[in-house]
Image (tube, coloured by chain):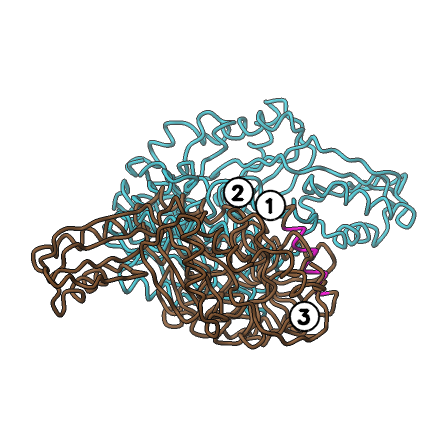
Chain colours: A cyan, B brown
Amino acid sequence: MGIVVQKYGGSSVADATSVKRVAQRIVATKKAGHDVVVVVSAMGDTTDELIDLANEISPLPPARELDMLLTAGERISMAVLAMAIGNLGQEARSFTGSQAGVITDSEHGRAKIIDVTPGRIEKALQEGAVAIVAGFQGVSQTTKDITTLGRGGSDTTAVALAAALHADVCEIYTDVDGIFTADPRIVSNARQIPRISYEETLEMAANGAKILHLRCVEYARRNAMPIHVRSSFSDKTGTWVVSSEAARTVGTKPARDAGPGSNSEETSMEQAIISGVAHDRSEAKITVVGVPDKVGEAASILRALGDAQINIDMIVQNVSAATTALTDISFTLPRADGQTAMTALARLKDSVGFERLQYDDSVGKVSIVGAGMRSSPGITATFFESLAAAGVNIEMISTSEIRISVVVAESQVDAAVNAAHAAFDLGTDEVQAVVYGGTGR
Amino acid sequence: MGIVVQKYGGSSVADATSVKRVAQRIVATKKAGHDVVVVVSAMGDTTDELIDLANEISPLPPARELDMLLTAGERISMAVLAMAIGNLGQEARSFTGSQAGVITDSEHGRAKIIDVTPGRIEKALQEGAVAIVAGFQGVSQTTKDITTLGRGGSDTTAVALAAALHADVCEIYTDVDGIFTADPRIVSNARQIPRISYEETLEMAANGAKILHLRCVEYARRNAMPIHVRSSFSDKTGTWVVSSEAARTVGTKPARDAGPGSNSEETSMEQAIISGVAHDRSEAKITVVGVPDKVGEAASILRALGDAQINIDMIVQNVSAATTALTDISFTLPRADGQTAMTALARLKDSVGFERLQYDDSVGKVSIVGAGMRSSPGITATFFESLAAAGVNIEMISTSEIRISVVVAESQVDAAVNAAHAAFDLGTDEVQAVVYGGTGR
């Protein structure tokens, strides 16, 4: 039997009761014959409480010290989880990111993993212990200071360790059953996706789906590490995130173990055209109106935004009207960056010579994602027809090879998600029975 | 200017306000031209809260994991203290015990420091930063696991670092002004001791005085590191704990810096005969009645207690009555060990053949401590006369070269302490004015 890496988020270890429940799951996995490595986040709201404490002390805490402070959170959760496992008669040893060999660069608060040398973890496994590793943290290769990985850090720790240990699977435990065809709070018949490719998951995550972070999926894709997203509250099979080849094969365990409820038939078939509908309400739209249609004007605008450290998402430039030689440039960006962007752009008004700026933070983005659209013409038409039938006006459009995104009024996001979900039959029982029957969910 | 090591306990960094106050003191010391290393305990009740959490999870948490858990406490306090110092414009870097080079054995929960290799601390000081070090913790030389030092651990960390860094002084900050001639809650005119030898401090600590722990004083004595015990709530000079030679010299700074309020005259004089009166209410007395007065019987009793891991303190054997050839053996021990000891002794009843066991936990120990008693006859007489005059009955007596201890009824402890304190003129204004005038307290 191989190595299983399990990652539990803060809500899965929020209190002593949850910790004990997680411990039982871990011991069960160990008893099933696996070597188990567990990556754990800080308990419940610990990280937020530590940030509050830091803010009580300093308006702008030094990044090195903030990392030192925040890493106390995982130190607590991993130690109590090891205790709870020990209580069940199974030895468990906790390790900080540094002890587990998670080597990073020196960018405090958003460090990148540059190497994983899990010698102590391997030794613990060889000696029959469960290894508990603090997520979200590492140690700088050059300064030897403690670093944190930033958003999605614990998921990334888990995948990186799984890759370094050549684990069979990286299980990411969460409070939902897996990745869904759409947000079940918006689409009542949204369906759990049994298997999805890294590429589709990246597009879903980049366009508003909240389960996995981009970094973690990207790391898994580069290392071909299967991720199993599943609920820490049930034993149901969740969603497997795998290579596009493996995603096209249903009914099989993508790795040596798919957990309870999976079967062993292997059936190759065509992939569903659309895997899911993602939405995002965190963006705003800025339009620069009346830009002279000359070489280099758009570049000046984008340079100013880049210099202000703003990541823009979609960008659209109107075809200029022949009579005026003026054009409009619209783009979307995180709402949190709205003020910074408007300030940076206002400074350019005279040099670029545009007419005015428009700011709209009542927008939302709706995306359909599916590897099958590569080989299926007419997807865009179906999507847009469904939006029109639902009375949804499209403000901007952006596409990739496996994704089509539209910006709509924020008030129309729910209608747009439901329309697209229905148009591609993502929620019908029939599709579910044919394509996904027999996986025992 | 040299290196100053400052240690702040949990009550000195209990909340954000206290942390900021301590930060100002540290920055003031740095601005006065010193290199500053700060050893800090966990904030307020953090350690107790973490122990409560562990007990919620497990009735007997594995010692390795308990150490991992508890060390989160200092991680938090040291990071926020570094932030608070940074806020005042002074760079500060926090270091775990492991990062600071505190190398210990592998006895989790009560590890002993076996080496200190403070290379990273020295580098931080050279680069102009204040170094903040987590007290109470280290890293095992053999297993590389995180360890804690047990009771008095932060004080010991501070002294050990001060010795390894060849600091001028180790300042131990507390919530009182220093070491007193007796507990001021019992003796209203108890006086702060300006200077006291390591040996006397060891006797005071071993016999109930609560300010410094034995290990820390012993470490300082072995390394001739001056300790300055002082209040974190004032700038007053506190109590210097120094070599017996230095303790006999008054009016001088024992090290290069004695802080504000000290003067620079050097006056050699005879030491006060008695330095202070200590008391201890944490012990119980067990009497083994009617032990056959044969070779090896006392040894059997002590072996049984030793095997049960019980440290006994005073021990007295009556001269046996010629007619019966039976004797009584009495000893004192921590009350917490009372039940274990009684159980261990009861098992010996038949083999040793004693008559019965008596247990008394309504006792207290009162000790007078002073290096001067070596050369002053009559001290014991003065002490005992004062007790008799106060109506205090002596139950047991024990002496060392610089200490006389008596066990009395617990209800008579206050009276005994006051009687001894007055008998040796420890609290009079006259003595204070002559010997300690001009130190500006």
Residue drawn at 44 percent across, 40 percent down: A14
Q: Main secondary structure of the magenta part?
A: helix
Please rate how many residues cluster around mark 2, counting C-alpha atoms within 10 Å: few if below 14, some from 14 to 19, many from 20: many
Q: Which mark is residue A425?
A: none
Quadrant showing the C terminus of chain A: top left
Disc 1 element: loop
Give whichever of A223, B186 is nearer the camera.
Answer: B186
Residue to which mark 1 is pinned: B15
Span of residues in magenta: B19-30
Same chain for labels 1 and 3? Say yes or no: yes
Q: Label 3: chain?
A: B
Give whichever of A368, B54 is nearer the camera.
Answer: B54
Q: Label 1: chain?
A: B
Q: Quadrant of residue B367?
A: bottom left
Residue to which mark 2 is pinned: A204
Residue to which mark 3 is pinned: B251
Disc 3 element: loop
